[in-house]
Amino acid sequence: MQAIDDRDFGVPRRDAAQSATLTIDGREITVPAGTALIRAAALAGIAIPKLCATDSLEPFGSCRLCLVEIDGRKGFLASCTTPAESGMKVRTQSEALGKLRRNVMELYMTDHPLDPFECKAGGACELHRMAAEVGLREVRYPRGGENHLDLKSDDSNPYFTFDPARCILCSRCVRACDDIQGTFALTIEGRGFASQMTPGQHERYLDSECVSCGACVQACPTDALMEKSALERGAADRAIVTTCGYCGVGCSFKAELRGDRIVRMVPNKNGLPNHGHSCVKGRFAWGYATHPDRVRRPLMRKRISDPWREVSWDEALRHAAAELKRVQRQYGRGAVGGITSSRCTNEEAYLVQKLVRAAFGNNNVDTCARVCHSPTGYGLKTAFGTPAGTQDFDSILQADVIMVIGANPTEGHPVFASIMKRRLREGARLIVADPRAIELVRMPHVTADYFLQLTPGTNVALLNAMAHTIVAEGLADDAFIAARCDADGYARWRQFILEERNSPEAAESITGVPADRIRGAARLYAKGPNSAIYYGLGVTEHAQGSTAVLAMANLAMAAGMLGRPGVGVNPLRGQNNVQGSNDVGSFPHELTGYRHVSDPALRAQFEAEWGVTLDPEPGLRIPNMFDAALDGSFRGLYVEGEDIAQSDPNSQHVAAALAAMEIVIVQDIFLNETSKYAHVFLPGSSFLEKNGTFTNAERRISPVRKVMPPLAGKEDWEVTCALAEALGYPMRYGHPSEIMDEIARLTPTFAGVSYEKLDRLGSVQWPCNEAAPAGTPVMHVGEFVRGRGRFLPTAYVPTLEKTGPRYPLILTTGRILTQYNVGTQTRRTGNVAWHPEDRLEIHPHDAEQRGVREGDWVEVTSRAGAIVLRATITDRVAPGVVYTTFHHPETGANVVTTENSDWATNCPEYKVTAVQVMPTSRRPERLPADRVIHAAAS
Amino acid sequence: MIHPKTCAVTRGGNEELGMDRHHLASMANEIGEFFESAASHDEAVAAIAQHLKSFWEPRMRREIIAYAAAGGGELTPIVREAVLTLKAPAENR
């Protein structure tokens, strides 16, 4: 288990080439020049009392508690703002300092409950600890004077309270909101005694622009800002470090527990993806884990129209195995398959693909990355040799130009967005390419230099035009290209990209983005000096998703923006383990480490380890499984953690395919849309109930640790092993660490990964092997994984999805901060306070033409189907484009999306659907009674 | 409202076992479109064939090969040429 070191050094670390050696309380210490005395003292093991200082924030120097004496200097100096200098002699304790600190504390306590028993944090808050530390025993001033003790508490936020009566105006919350989160939602209003911390314009928390990231709660040294769960459940008695179960940032958290009950989730300050920061989902939205809807016993039924029947694990597994075998006997070995989710751990995804390949005897295994980032895998592997992001997250702190294309980091990857916003506040320039004006286009202290509002489906034309500009204007990095890239490929690509069809003028007519803006953005990107691309599903979920990834790779190679910190091509992965589930062999054509099943030497290694003969042919991908189900050649499916009936495109097609199958086994924590078509339901475990690892978007493998027992009695990996056993192929492991050991034995890029190393280092980024025992933050340094970088011509091909008189608008989809994908988890938390329904964003011009007013119910029809939801009128979308989220099953956004897909990978084209929007008297279908969602306090 | 491609029975009466050829042809043509613009004719033919071999499950390949052999009217010429270079994988029971 990873050790937890929570020491607060008072101010952030300073890195400097020079050092300073000084003496503090007689102890000599050497620190980087510029280090504040409070940190130098902490490094020497001396804790100086403090209130307004904390090492996640720049020093503020307001509380006057951290005063010290320095030989040769007059008076008392704040140790948080005084830098260490060589030869200094510092005293942190003296009679005068003690008296001063007690006086300062005494003044604070005149306006705060003195008795620790009155402390909402049970006396554990920093204020009461400091009061005890400085020896304050009484307050001499009378209590009857003017004070703030009667101010009303703001309980509007679902997860935390703000009690202004307990606030000491240290500004830690305000600074955390500004400097860490970058939202600027909090302020100190008024002057002098009337000063008060307030969200927004003297609003309640819930009504303000606060994004509920928890940074203020984390920073508060008193009991003014407190988690409701901690108030309700009391102080924790233990903590376990684990990894968040939501997005691909993969934040490290401390699960604080009282017994087996979670008191709160606190971002781990030593967590390398998040550095102690969090978002509303990871920090607070974990209550779904114990929601009453959780299924705790296996379920079975003969027909999908029958009611569920609770059965024993043994009966469910025996029946599932018998049915899978029957289907294979009747229809052939290839008639069954398995699908995993990116919410599964690496170990679980590995076991399911092993089960399919070894026990089913085919390669019909796929994962939900098929429908999100499979084009990333294809494109980056083709161009660079490995299908993964090139950088670590912290690399962005060295970027001079940031290009965000087809991603919405403040909503989808909020903690990484905070790092990005910090870099932008420091002066980095920003290019945003998106059909919709995402928050980053203009927000406090961030304005995009170029907002390229392109028509959905035209990314390739835009990227090509940027590359055209770079080459045509002599901005290409010829030295990088000559040293690092394939010369023939470059020559061919250069000729292609200089063609008139790739000029900014040609692109303007396709994308709608003025040619001069494309040129300006291209020049900015090329000149860097460090330019980094960050992208999301707005790039991949297109008919040309893979082509666009290749086009970005071409752009980065042409400008020499690879192989060092501050640059790169970086996918922002939607779910916590998209990267990992791909790494461990979940695609039907690849074994672990992205190696093709057709390689006989590779298969021989796995055959030796697994004791079976493996199929050398690629298996069915998810959309192919549905097609094969409808032609009758695919009749059985094992789905772990993925709600394909809600999340995959063209819902009616998926439903028809599932209904055509003879055995559908769903393993999940809740009954969902897919389980409506299931014959066996195996209750799964949440990320809090199991051991394993997740691999985030920066290739970082982080531990997932069991913090409470699985509600249904089994961790998911144990269920898969039990199913394998029932199929007659025993997969026996004592602990998931043994599964990771097997992955490491079979996978060169994972050869150095072990649980022991993860406990020791906290996390590692693959490749992690003999050549890089501590992992690899930046890839392709000096040489691409494939040797020479590969340029490929990327001709723009318009999507088959056309607008016309019948469907004149383009629908595109996305996510919102407080909800997560199909909402299985977040809809069962207090997050519904912010996003109770999906809305359709429509431009005022399009709304007026159709007589649609704000909040009206509208019907969205496409050639695949029709949905009903309410409209929000906004110019965030361009005329001709409408947008919605897909978090609520009542909306069923995927009823209208089509079967169009990426040419290389079959990743669905979610982002472009031709639709019509009209006012309607229809309403969404109500959910059946057993599917009603209850928000649980968490 | 159900799209014509939604299920086998509405895909032009494809009741007999076998993947929907219209859909497969459309997918294959999109693969062809990429490689045709990215490489010389011979390289593109080889790349299309290799892509199908690497990523298409045998029953999909069998279907498209049979379709190409029967004329493959919906296939672009280069895709048909590439498909006809493939050997049909054996039935896997």
Image (cartoon, coloured by chain):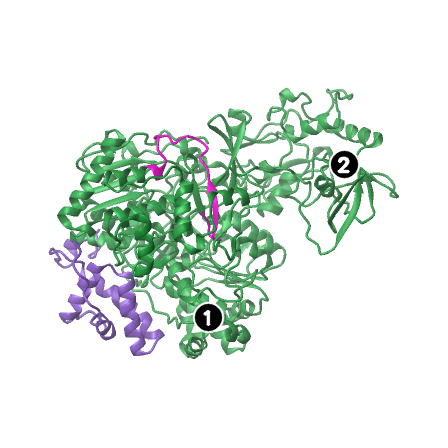
Chain colours: A green, B purple
Q: Which residue is mark 1?
A: A788
Does residue A671 appear to the left or right of A881 in the view shown? left
- Whether residue A918 is visible here, answered yes or no, is no
Report the number of discs: 2
Chain containing mark 1: A
Q: Which residue is mark 2?
A: A64
* Magenta highlight on residue A166: no
| Residue drawn where x is 34% and y is 76% of the image | B39
> Residue A776: where, in percent of width, then height?
52, 56
Q: Nearer the viewer, residue A87 or A190?
A: A87
Q: Nearer the viewer, residue A291 or B49?
A: B49
Are labels 2 and 1 on one chain? yes
Q: Which residues are magenta?
A: A695-718
Does residue A472 appear to the left or right of A863 in the view shown? right
> Residue A92: where, in percent of width, then height?
79, 36
Of label 2 and label 1, which has the lower sequence position?
A: 2
> Residue A511: where, in percent of width, then height?
41, 67
Q: Give the amino acid type for the residue marked by disc 1 in the picture.
A: Arg
| Rendered view: A522 above or below A206 | below
- Whether residue A169 is visible here, answered yes or no, is yes
Q: At numbered mark 2, what does the secondary structure look like: helix, strand or loop?
A: loop
Q: Give the amino acid type for the residue marked by disc 2 in the picture.
A: Arg
| Rendered view: B8 above or below A53 | below
Chain containing mark 2: A
Q: Nearer the viewer, mark 2 or mark 1?
A: 1
Q: Residues within 10 Å of mark 1 (few under 14, many from 20)?
A: many
Does residue A113 appear to the left or right of B78 in the view shown? right
Q: At numbered mark 1, what does the secondary structure look like: helix, strand or loop?
A: loop
Q: Residues within 10 Å of mark 2 (few under 14, many from 20)?
A: many
- Contact, mark 2 vs mark 1 (Cβ under 8 Å): no
> Residue A913: where, in percent of width, then height?
32, 57
